[in-house]
Amino acid sequence: MKFDLSEEQALLQSSTRDFLGSELPLEKTRNVMEHQPDGYEAAQWRSLADMGYIGLTLPATANGQGLGTIELAIVLEEMGRVCAPGPFLDVVLAASLLAASGKEAALLADVVHGKSLVTIARQDSPFSGNHVQPARFENGRVRGTKYFVPFAARTDALLVTTPQGIVLVRAPYDVVPLETIDLGQRFAEVKLDNEGTLIGGPELLEKVDLLGAVGASAMMLGLMSRSLEITLGYVQTRQAFKRPIGAFQALQHRMADMLLKTESTRSAVYRAAWCLDTGDKDTKLACATAKAYAGDAARYVCGEAIQMHGGIGFTWELDLHFYFKRAKTLEQFYGSTEAQLEKALAAAGW
Amino acid sequence: MDLQLSDTHVKFRDELRAWLKANMGRPWREELRDPKANEDSLMELRRGWQRKLYEGGYLGMDWPAEWGGRGATEVEKSIFEAEMSSADAPPILNSLGIGLLGPALIHHGSEAQRRRFIPPMLSGDEIWCQGFSEPGAGSDLASLRTSAAIDGDHFVLNGQKIWTTFGPWADWIFVLARTDSKDRYGGISFILCKLDTPGVTVRRLRQITGESEFGEVFFEDARVPRENLVGQIGEGWRIAMTVLAFERGAMGLAASERYGRDLRLLAQTCKELGREGGAVREKLARLLVENEVLRANGLRMLANLADGKVPGPESSIEKIFWSEFDKRFRETALDILGPGGQLLRTSPEARPDVDWSREFLWSRAGTIYSGSSEVQRNIISKRVLNLPQEGR
């Protein structure tokens, strides 16, 4: 037994940290998020692909690296630490869905190589609930509107969920941007009346959803861990009443709780990743646990980071709001907390 | 990263399970509910159970072979605790002797002390209680004032100890006492005192549960032979601190087994009572998720132990997590059950599976004993977060 990363995993962690440190430092990210309408830069996407990150968990036969969920979690945790903008997790999940379908090999190869962008279109309404008719696939055509489609404006194709199965739809389609609080995650409403190809039944999503839950949780872990670091740095230097504010027990105990939630998230995320990789019997419960817990913990930790900075924490100028916003976005997507709680109950047979 | 138990550990666990099946009587919850049971009979039951475990080779597993040890590691001890939890085995009676004093004697005691005290400690013939806390020294233990004056070849003890778990049932107490009133840490010595020594009085304290598992111990010119000093004069604080470190281990794993079992029973009860609305289900789900995080923390701790890592301040995270969760869990359980959750276990209408009202009250203790949540947060801010300390 061993909780620490293996030598190879630690190497992946440090090389990813170095890579992101030079490719996506926060001052650059801030610029991209504020000025680039797509929310990320094509050049950065190509270098991610060149490094092999997109196909990290895919088998070699699909031009992937054949690594596991633990490795994906390591990379996503690092991306969370720098609050990386862009569709990385969305494309990884779409690629994983394509690979699971065993179809569209050429498209999958292009996705892995960063030449094509594909994401999954799931939401049938901007709000939760089943108050609308879902998009339908009939006679070779998809009709309906999908909301919160990740980075739809830049996609070459979408994997559209319908009651009839998952349908591949190639661009062009009608895209209306949806502006949200998180500038690093761009969403759109997509109106579909397009030809499509059925690539498989809804059951293909099962494994992809587990991967998405762990992946989003790992990214939240990175957000938390970096927010706490930034806060620890600040409270050591910021003076009030003639001492660093970090000397006040009122703040110390809250930072202890921030650490508790961050490290507990780490335990839950890597346990879930390990379960997925080993096919453990507790996999479903562990994945739902990681996502449900990380969602609450990330909002708490990133929110407390703002609070401890005082007024400056509420400014656009400080980076912390990007972390707080990303935490909220990740909490609501890839299976919301509510959905994960239902999954946890189902996994326990309650 | 690997969270799978090794083959050796799986073998250990399976043997233990088989042993439990052959040797354990009724689960603890059933013993507690037996109408004929009282505090004394339950203590005797725990003594008998302890003897069985000792004969089975499951006590002092990590001690040297001559004291019953079998070269077990922290991992096996943690697995042992988790399996005891999962089987709802009765708790042993001499947990303070075996958990704290045993290691103290092995590491700091004399050969004569080991020979005299360890065998009856293991067999349950002599029960120990711990004399650390005082009315004026709890979280700030080093401010303790019980004194041990040297008079020829005796110490003369004066003072008061409190929250003395098993006090009313113990034969002996290990005491931290002042041999020097000026030296805060270096003036403390570790002394063993028989409770029937003239000048020693034990009084029961009634807890909020109505039970008296703990008590207070008064010393009035109680004379203790010098040979009952463990280590050297003034070494008491150091011994106490090293010994408390043995309390660690993957506590979270054992706790998550116990809570997991009670949670399953709560979920079944909800089905039975028709409590299947959204509000109830969300509460259940949140408890389930939190308990699984506790399990993940426990597995991480276990894996670190197996990897040869000495648990550091992260045991504070585990302690806060399980004790704070215990409170939320038990409160929520009572909310879900409605007024019936408050029934005492002796009531014919009380749920037969879990003693919810007692658990609800007991959960207030976990965040106070063994280092309160506040002390644990201090430890984290000082030793993990390296925050400046002058602002207290």
Image (cartoon, rainbow, N blue to C red):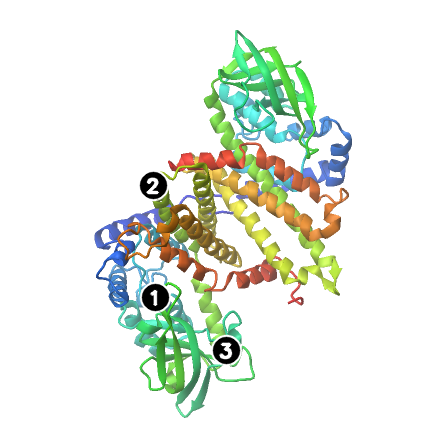
* Mark 1 residue type: Glu
Q: Is residue B45 visible?
A: yes
* Mark 2 residue type: Leu
Label whose residue precedes the other's in the sequence (3 or 2):
3
- Marks 3, 1: nearer the viewer: 1
Secondary element at image label 2: helix
Query: Quadrant where the C terminus of chain A lies?
Result: top left
> Disc 1 sits on a residue from what chain?
B
Q: Mark 2 and mark 1, same subunit?
A: yes
Q: Which mark is residue B167?
A: none
Q: Which mark is residue B273?
A: 2
- Marks 3, 2: nearer the viewer: 2
> Disc 3 sits on a residue from what chain?
B
Disc 3 target residue: B144
* Mark 3 residue type: Leu
Secondary element at image label 3: loop
Residue A285, placed above or below residue B149 = above
Question: Contact (CB < 8 A) between labels 2 and 1?
Answer: no
Label whose residue precedes the other's in the sequence (2 or 1):
1
Label whose residue precedes the other's in the sequence (3 or 1):
3
Disc 1 target residue: B211
Spatial distance from mark 3 to mark 1, Cα to Cα? 27 Å
